[in-house]
Image (cartoon, grey):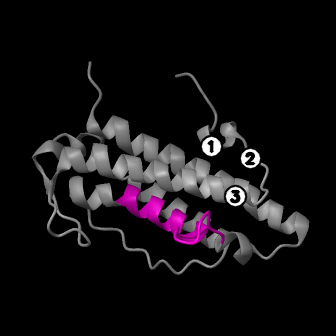
């Protein structure tokens, strides 16, 4: 049996966003333990030309939720990108995970036949399967990884297991 587009995406997004939420828990504890304002971490970046932590979380969630509207035919979930605290970012993640849980496993079966044109790339339409496998999946992992890296770089005690999450056998 082959994997479906749903199987390789939505559960992976839910898992990685859950792991990201745990990373943010550790960031909040780090700030509380050391008397550091959360805004210090939220505005940290790895390089001057990279987005800060807050934007990394926003983009990871935006990419994951985009599958619902673009490939599953759901109403687009709109989020304001106004988070200024860790608890607000965790709420954003929870909202996106709840939205992802509304995507039916069969709703991505015809992803290959969909055409996706992103508002910021109007001259580059993509087949739905390419969009999912070669645009969204790498973007979600990139931005979650970058959030991890920003936190780790700033001294939050994290390890690979925090990024990967619990390994449970079915």
Q: Residues within 10 Å of mark 3 (few under 14, many from 20)?
A: many
Asked if disc 1 and disc 2 are in contact, CB closer than 8 Å, the reply is yes
Q: Residue furthest front?
A: 48
Q: Give the camera-side residue of 161 and 95.
A: 161
What range of the chain is rendered magenta? 44-65
Name the residue beneath numbered marker 1. Answer: 163
Residue 53 position in % (x across, y down): 60, 66
Measured from the top left, where is residue 79 in percent x and y? 43, 74
Q: Is residue 144 above or below residue 122?
A: above
Q: Secondary structure at mark 3?
A: helix
| Apparent side of residue 82 relative to residue 78 in the rendered image (left or right) | right
Give the quarter of the figure containing the N terminus: top left
SS type, badge 2: loop
Return the residue at label 3: 151
Q: In the displayed structure, would residue 166 be above or below residue 39?
A: above
Q: Earlier in the sequence, mark 1 or mark 2?
A: 2
Q: Is residue 59 visible?
A: yes
Q: Who's the residue at 29% across and 45% down the image?
A: 134
Distance, label 3 to label 2, CA atoms, is 8 Å
Residue nearest the viewer, comparing 106 with 48: 48
Rounded to the nearest angstrom, the CA distance separating label 1 from label 3 is 11 Å
Residue displayed at 45% across by 41% down: 12
Left or right for 83, reference 63: right
- For the residues labelled 1 and 3, say whether their Cβ atoms are less than 8 Å apart: no
Which residue is located at x 27 percent, y 66 percent? 75
Q: Crowdedness of circle 2 by 10 Å Cα count: few (<14), some, many (20+)?
A: some
Residue positioned 36% across, 53% down in the render:
102
Mark 1 Cα shell of 10 Å, populated few (<14), some (14-19), many (≥20): some
> Of label 1 and label 3, which has the lower sequence position?
3
Q: Earlier in the sequence, mark 3 or mark 2?
A: 3
Query: Does the segment drawn in magenta span residue 121?
Result: no
């Amino acid at each position: 049996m082959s994997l479906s587009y749903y199987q390789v995406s939505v559960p992976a997004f839910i898992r990685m966003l859950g792991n990201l939420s745990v990373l943010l828990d550790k960031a909040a504890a780090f700030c509380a333990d050391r008397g550091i304002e959360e805004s210090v971490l939220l505005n940290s970046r790895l390089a001057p030309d990279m987005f800060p932590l807050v934007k990394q979380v926003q983009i990871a969630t935006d990419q994951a939720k985009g599958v619902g509207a673009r490939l599953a035919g759901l109403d687009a979930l709109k989020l304001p990108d106004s988070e200024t605290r860790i608890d607000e970012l965790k709420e954003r993640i929870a909202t996106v995970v709840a939205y992802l849980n509304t995507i039916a496993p069969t709703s991505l079966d015809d992803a290959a036949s969909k055409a996706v044109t992103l508002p910021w790339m109007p001259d580059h339409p993509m087949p739905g399967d390419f969009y999912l496998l070669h645009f969204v999946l790498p973007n979600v992992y990139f931005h979650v990884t970058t959030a991890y890296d920003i936190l780790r770089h700033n001294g939050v005690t994290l390890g690979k297991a925090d990024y990967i999450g619990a390994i449970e056998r079915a």
